[in-house]
């Protein structure tokens, strides 16, 4: 007999574990002090009947990290005791994520941490100089560090002061915010609230599908006919994915990826901050059609204001539900690009290190908590309502150059008007710049571009008329991915851009597999040489692409190959 709900599944699993082993009277190793346990309990609460849920470990670590400005060793020991875990198990999770700062008991935590983005778009806007200025001006109990992409490439250079984002940051602005202790999340964006969303017909489709007035099969057929594909990077057909997971045994679960860590990508944040209920209706439709008992939404940690906004939207929805709602939990990432990979995200939601799983089995069969799981990117779900209203034919007809549908392109770099651009799928880079970005920035001419973020490769200006869509860029050694377009000009260097993104990959590799862990680091060292060793880099790229476990190591060599193929004059390669 199948359990009636996912909560019943959790209860059954917990009872089984209790029968299999009796907990020790105390854990091995260092013991938690009563004072430290009291401090931890004050934040995470007393253990419920059956104990704290193992999958909430990262959420509890966030509470401690936020409150104490770091994870103090005595609190890690106390948290382990509270959750009946080994200290090493808690420590290995805490040390995996960049946003957790582990401190010794006698070590002072920084009052404020200032994070300066060093990824490509911000680097083009002078973030390196900004970092050095801030490190010279902000001393004492203020920590200034460089960090990978924070998802605000259109606002370059971007800085985080505590949990507050600073767009187009200057040293004066950042110092002022630190001095005035402006570290809380930014004021909430002017997003569409539930009453306004309902007035536009919001949640009607969710209500009709949940009630059976609209057949689930017809929804899947609409997705298949429209050609909608996953818009997080992999591009798997959405309708086929729904059909596969729907055929699996219940209970089925759903995991939503809003980690959006690809340098150059910020479209999910932009859409979430403008219309969160359009996304949530897509979630409800997918959960209803596929039959998902619970939904876990994984939001990147840098999006503090968006998290507040989404929490409020979920509360409004639960207070005025248009139909029976699945169990929904909002989970907070902790600064790990690898968690954008679907199985690594699932590991993180389960409270573990975000390391990709070996496949098979695929997560559609064995995913979150061992159950069949529908995983989707934010933007894919954001399209669902509009697609159902338009119909598949009308949606597909809006493409260009033989492609189907619309896409949101995150455009940054050397253009007059960076931002999220809603444009036909298949638009070319030249058309995108001229029609949607106001042309190139003053004093800049097109030299090169990254069509799919850090991992999508680099193309020269002479290929600016290639359609930007799935399957159109592969013949040129690139791919569209999440449609993160970074534009370079004659003042920039393709080899410098490639080195920047390779250093990003080396920083963000989870370290699980040797080809990626060693390969990205070694590649960055070789690429810093005045003259590239083309043969060695080609061999390294081949090994990384063939032997890495997941897409990070497999796609990391793309910038190497592109520079060697299209810009050999920059690296002294034949």
Image: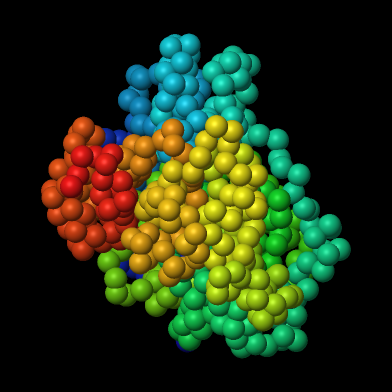
Query: Which residue is located at x 52 percent, y 36 percent?
Result: 444
Q: Name the one closer to the observer, 109 or 191.
A: 191
| Residue 409 visible | yes
Horizontal and vertical percent for residue 193?
Answer: 78, 53
Quadrant in the picture for residue 295: bottom right
Left or right placement of residue 292 versus residue 16 in this view: right
Q: Name the one closer to the observer, 507 or 460.
A: 460
Horizontal and vertical percent for residue 88?
Answer: 27, 43
Query: Which residue is located at x 64 percent, y 58 percent?
Result: 422
Horizontal and vertical percent for residue 122?
Answer: 48, 34
Left or right placement of residue 397 versus residue 120 in this view: right
| In this view, 477 is above or below 325 | above
Disc count in the image? 0
| In this view, 386 is above or below 262 | below
Horizontal and vertical percent for residue 524?
Answer: 24, 40
Left or right placement of residue 33 versus residue 202 in this view: left
């Amino acid at each position: 007999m199948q359990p009636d709900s996912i909560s019943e599944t959790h209860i059954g699993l917990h009872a089984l574990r209790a029968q299999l082993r009796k907990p020790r009277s105390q854990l091995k190793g260092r013991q938690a002090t009563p004072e430290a346990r009291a401090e931890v309990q004050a934040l995470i609460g007393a253990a419920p009947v059956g104990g704290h849920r193992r999958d909430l470990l990262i959420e509890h670590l966030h509470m401690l990290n936020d409150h104490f400005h770091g994870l103090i060793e005595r609190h890690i020991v106390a948290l382990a005791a509270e959750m009946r875990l080994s200290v090493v198990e808690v420590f290995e999770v805490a040390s995996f994520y960049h946003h957790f700062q582990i401190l010794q008991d006698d070590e002072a935590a920084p009052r404020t941490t200032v994070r300066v983005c060093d990824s490509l778009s911000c680097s083009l806007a002078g973030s390196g100089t900004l970092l050095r200025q801030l490190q010279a001006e902000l001393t004492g109990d203020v920590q200034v560090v460089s960090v990978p992409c924070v998802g605000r490439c259109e606002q370059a250079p971007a800085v985080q002061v505590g949990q507050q984002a600073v767009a187009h940051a200057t040293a004066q602005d950042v110092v002022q915010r630190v001095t005035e202790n402006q570290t809380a999340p930014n004021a909430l964006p002017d997003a569409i609230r539930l009453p306004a969303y309902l007035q536009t017909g919001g949640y009607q489709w969710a209500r009709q599908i949940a009630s059976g007035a609209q057949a689930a099969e017809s929804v899947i057929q609409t997705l298949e006919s429209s050609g909608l594909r996953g818009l997080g990077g992999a591009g798997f057909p959405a309708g086929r994915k729904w059909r596969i997971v729907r055929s699996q045994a219940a209970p089925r679960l759903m995991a939503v990826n809003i980690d959006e860590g690809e340098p150059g990508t910020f479209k999910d944040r932009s859409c979430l901050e403008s219309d969160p209920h359009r996304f949530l209706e897509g979630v409800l439709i997918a959960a209803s059609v596929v039959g998902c008992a619970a939904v876990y939404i994984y939001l990147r940690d840098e999006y503090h204001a968006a998290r507040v906004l989404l929490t409020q939207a979920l509360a409004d929805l639960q207070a005025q539900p248009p139909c029976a709602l699945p169990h929904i939990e909002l989970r907070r990432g902790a600064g790990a690009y690898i968690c954008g990979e679907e199985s690594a995200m699932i590991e993180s939601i389960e409270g573990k290190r975000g390391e990709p799983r070996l496949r098979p089995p695929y997560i559609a069969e064995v995913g979150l908590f061992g159950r069949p799981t529908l995983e989707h990117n934010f933007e894919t779900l954001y399209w669902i309502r509009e697609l159902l209203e338009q119909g598949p034919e009308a949606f597909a007809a809006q493409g260009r150059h033989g492609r189907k549908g619309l896409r949101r392109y995150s455009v940054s770099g050397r253009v007059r008007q960076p931002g999220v651009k809603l444009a036909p799928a298949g638009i070319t880079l030249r058309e995108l710049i001229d029609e949607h970005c106001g042309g190139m920035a003053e004093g800049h001419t097109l030299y090169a571009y990254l069509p799919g973020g850090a991992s999508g490769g680099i193309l020269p200006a002479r290929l600016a008329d290639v359609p930007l869509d799935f399957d159109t860029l592969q013949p040129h050694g690139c791919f569209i991915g999440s449609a993160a377009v970074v534009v370079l000009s004659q003042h920039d260097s393709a080899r410098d851009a490639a080195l920047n993104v390779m250093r990003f990959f080396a920083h963000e590799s989870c370290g699980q597999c040797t080809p990626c862990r060693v390969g990205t680091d070694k590649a960055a060292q070789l690429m810093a040489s005045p003259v590239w060793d083309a043969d060695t880099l080609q061999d390294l790229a081949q090994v990384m692409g063939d032997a890495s476990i997941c897409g990070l190591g497999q796609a990391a060599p793309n910038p190497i190959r592109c520079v060697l193929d299209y810009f050999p004059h920059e690296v002294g390669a034949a």
